[in-house]
Image (cartoon, grey):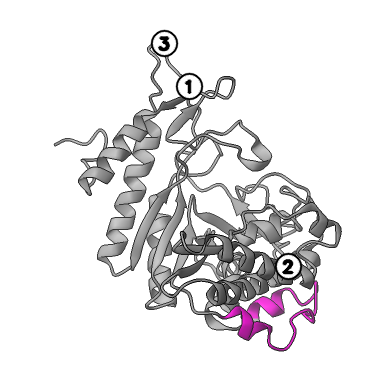
Amino acid sequence: LYHWDLPQELEDAGGWPERATAERFAEYASLVAGALGDRVERWTTLNEPWCSAFLGYGSGVHAPGRTDQADALRAAHHLNLAHGLGTQALRAALPAGAQTSVTLNLHHVRPLTDGPADLDAARRIDGVANRVFTGPMLRGEYPDDVLRDTAHLTDWSFVEDGDLADIHQPLDFLGVNYYSPTLVSAASGPGTHNADGHGASEHSPWPGGDDVAFHRTPGETTAMGWTIDPSGMYDLLLRVRDDFPGMPVVITENGAAFDDYVDPEGRVLDPQRISYLHGHLAAVHRAIEAGADVRGYFLWSLLDNFEWGYGYSKRFGAVYVDYATGRRIPKESARWYAKVVRDGALPPEPGARA
């Protein structure tokens, strides 16, 4: 229902830092469920509320481009509340059997070393990357350490009586988006956040993490500068298995942008994307074998498209779009992926010996 597309009138009235925005979202959810509930069986309230809150109101690299960490935390809470109120509105309007969910871009946060300072840096970033959402949504509480780590920014008085009960709604599945792991360490002075993969800004999207340094993870990267590391997908799925037993998972986004082009024969050859998908699908399969309850996987994305602040400069699609003409050309990865779907099995890894 929501993928960062707040109506301008609501932003003019204060946006997500304002409680009323969550209330308007619940009304919107009810209206859409009434219009489409006889045709849509699975509903997701929010996509990546971390980005909405912390990139929109913290670092300002996404709309509306505001840079206030206290407002970012207020926004996170009201997005949590919007999810809870929206889920209740959906259930009141939808027919029995419809499923509800939320999609989180859970960060797989790794410490640079096993030293206590780096482990604590990872804990703090994990708090405002993941647990500020999973805590209230899936446990009905904000973690104590997150409240302590951000107490110098806000007293959290915007959390009103009854909010946590409203937020903590049963889910039919959890949507998880994954692209790359996050590597952090403690910093001896002011930290650096522009290696976090979320765009350059003088302002940090990590409340309470001003003395944390972010590092480029080793390995090959995509056109976004994101490290290709399927092990992060595996580790993340096992964490969900362990932290939230019985919670089904749907991988709602996973994919990669590369510098794709049409060759003289009219083909779009993208072996890097095929390798990326092979590695991540294999990681999902290993996680399922280890007990992760994964019910689905969605490739991001079908088509090259508008990538927010990057415009049309980054191509994630399995299908190439000629933006001048609208012509669509299936990339080699589209044919490879179609065969995987048809066969229900992964072929040998590209380049591997039979």
Which numbered dot is residue 24? 2
Q: Amino acid at mark 3?
A: Pro
Left or right: where does residue 164 sit relative to residue 259?
Answer: right
Q: CA distance from mark 3 to mark 1?
A: 10 Å
Mark sitting earlier along the chain (3/2): 2
The part of the image, by quadrant, that contains residue 159 is bottom right
Mark sitting earlier along the chain (1/2): 2
**Labels 1 and 2 touching (C-beta < 8 A):** no
Which label sits in the foreground, 1 or 2?
Answer: 2
Where in the figure is residue 141, as x and y percent of width and height?
A: 61, 83
Mark 1: few, some, or many residues within 10 Å (few <14, many ≥20)? some
Left or right: where does residue 350 sit relative to residue 70?
Answer: left
Q: CA distance from mark 1 to mark 2?
A: 43 Å
- Residue 208 belongs to the span the image colors magenta: no
- In the figure, 138 relative to 211: above or below? below
Question: Observer-nearest residue: 16 or 70?
Answer: 16
Q: Is residue 73 visible?
A: no
Q: Amino acid at mark 1?
A: Tyr
- In the figure, 99 relative to 270: above or below? below
Mark 3: few, some, or many residues within 10 Å (few <14, many ≥20)? few
Q: Amino acid at mark 2?
A: Arg
Mark 2: few, some, or many residues within 10 Å (few <14, many ≥20)? some
Name the residue carrying label 1: 261
Q: Secondary structure at mark 1?
A: loop
- Residue 150 belongs to the span the image colors magenta: yes
Q: Which residues are magenta?
A: 145-168
Question: Observer-nearest residue: 113 or 91?
Answer: 91
Question: Observer-nearest residue: 185 or 226?
Answer: 226
**Labels 3 and 1 touching (C-beta < 8 A):** no
Name the residue carrying label 3: 264
Q: Is residue 36 visible?
A: yes
Q: Residue furthest right?
A: 13
